[in-house]
Amino acid sequence: MQISNGVKELIKKIIPSFLINFYHFSLAFSAALIYRFPSKKLKIIGITGTNGKSTVVEMVSKILEEADYKVAVLSSIKFKIKDKEWQNTLRMTMPGRFILQKFLRQAVNSQCQYAVLEVTSEGIKQYRHKFIDFEVAVLTNLSPEHIEAHGSFEKYRQAKRELFLATKGIHIINLDDENAGYFLKFPAKHKFGFTISDRHPIGQELFSTITARNIKVLASGLKFYIDDTEFNLKLLAKFNVYNSLAAVCIGLSQGISLEICKSALEKIKGVPGRMEMVISQPFKVFVDYAFTPNALQKVYETLSKSKVKSQKSKVICVLGSCGGGRDKWKRPVLGKLAAKYCQEVIVTNEDPYDEDPMEIIAEVAKGTEGKAKKILDRREAIREAISLAKTKDIIIITGKGCEPSICLAGGKKIPWDDRKVAKEEFEKLFK
């Protein structure tokens, strides 16, 4: 039986926090004990941050595999142990302690040398990272998110900090993030930083800096240099330069050459649900996971710049905001961003959990100042976007990416895939 979010919140209010923490800690220890502390036989790479975690996990796993290592991967997108891969249908980026420790034990039994994990603030808060020996901790970036769950941005940042306090080996930091200085102060045997600027931190011991230069954002992908090595990626959007740099830093930290990193990254054709083009003609339809203001703005900026200048093309967006009491503050902010960058805005249902979905839609639409169409049914909203599109237009559907379900009240889930639905509705209208 599923427990509703409302009941969970009530339990949290009634039970003292130290008892809740002890409960989570006990589960973490029990799981590690039952599965015989598998992380001690693996090199564990933990990747945290607000945005980009799944993409960096995908990239670094390809680099490790290119270097002939046996790799296990756990992200919001998938589970993978060597050649065996299956979708993450849990709707949890960092699953519970027993699932996580069992996965690591399976990786050990399959003779993997590395495990690459997404590490979330909520997972850290619930001690899911405990009794995992991390070799490498990576910060992609940090911006306001999960504020209501943690109580403040500072507490959210402190949760991320715990990964770095638990990792004594290698720290890898995005130097262009305004929180870089906060994370650089934690001790490690070696620290790597990545940047697209020429500024370098002063007084950092054991520090290696990786810089991307001569960056070109092309219609076909990205081009940039690290030292004298040219990278030509098939991935869209400038923010993927940062993701690439994080992955390269991890590779270099493990003694993998820049040439192998280049070879691996250039083979990646895309990441599921991350700026994924699902329709290319007569207009383009993209699906992206972005659900934070920072991520959404970068997606919109990328697509706005890519519009064909000679055509009166427009950007049509479909967005929502997840419910369950999650970060209500950002709903009108998301709407405002959509109205700023998109010529047509459709606000729809996403993952309402126990909230009234129309109330969530109204809060997002409020930020558009009357520009949005409000359509409750997500399939209908996608159909409307496709029907509005003309040749050379761009449709961007955000918030879910490749997630396999929509979460409703009482823990109910219905099967879903934005990519599949977009293709189905396109076929109905244009074939």
Image: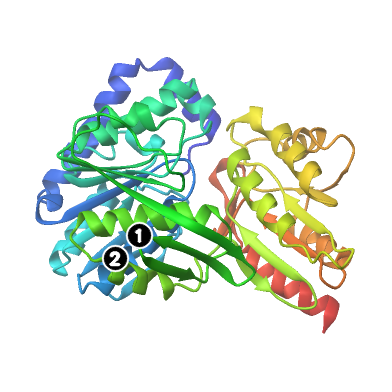
Q: What is the distance, in whole Å, between disc 2 and disc 1 at their CAs? A: 9 Å
Q: In this image, 220 relative to 266: left or right?
A: right
User: Which mark identifies residue 227?
Assistant: 1
Q: Amino acid at mark 1?
A: Asp
Q: Amino acid at mark 2?
A: Leu
Residue 426, how many percent across, how many down? 78, 74
Classify mark 1: helix, strand or loop.
loop
Q: In this image, 247 relative to 221: left or right?
A: left
Query: At x 65% / y 44%, what residue is drawn?
Result: 297
The answer to which quarter of the image holds residue 78 is bottom left
Query: At x 45% / y 51%, what residue is drawn?
Result: 242
Question: Label 1 crowding class (10 Å Cα cut-off): few <14, some 14-19, many 20+?
Answer: few
User: Which mark identifies residue 175?
Assistant: none
**In this view, 398 is above or below 83:** above
User: Which mark identifies residue 258?
Assistant: 2
Q: In this image, 325 relative to 207: left or right?
A: right
User: Which of 238 and 48 lies nearest the eye of the viewer?
Assistant: 238
> In the orientation shown, which residue stands out farthest toward the bottom?
431
Tag 2 and tag 1, C-beta contact below 8 Å = yes
Query: At x 50% / y 58%, what residue is drawn?
Result: 214
- Residue 54: tell me if it is visible: no
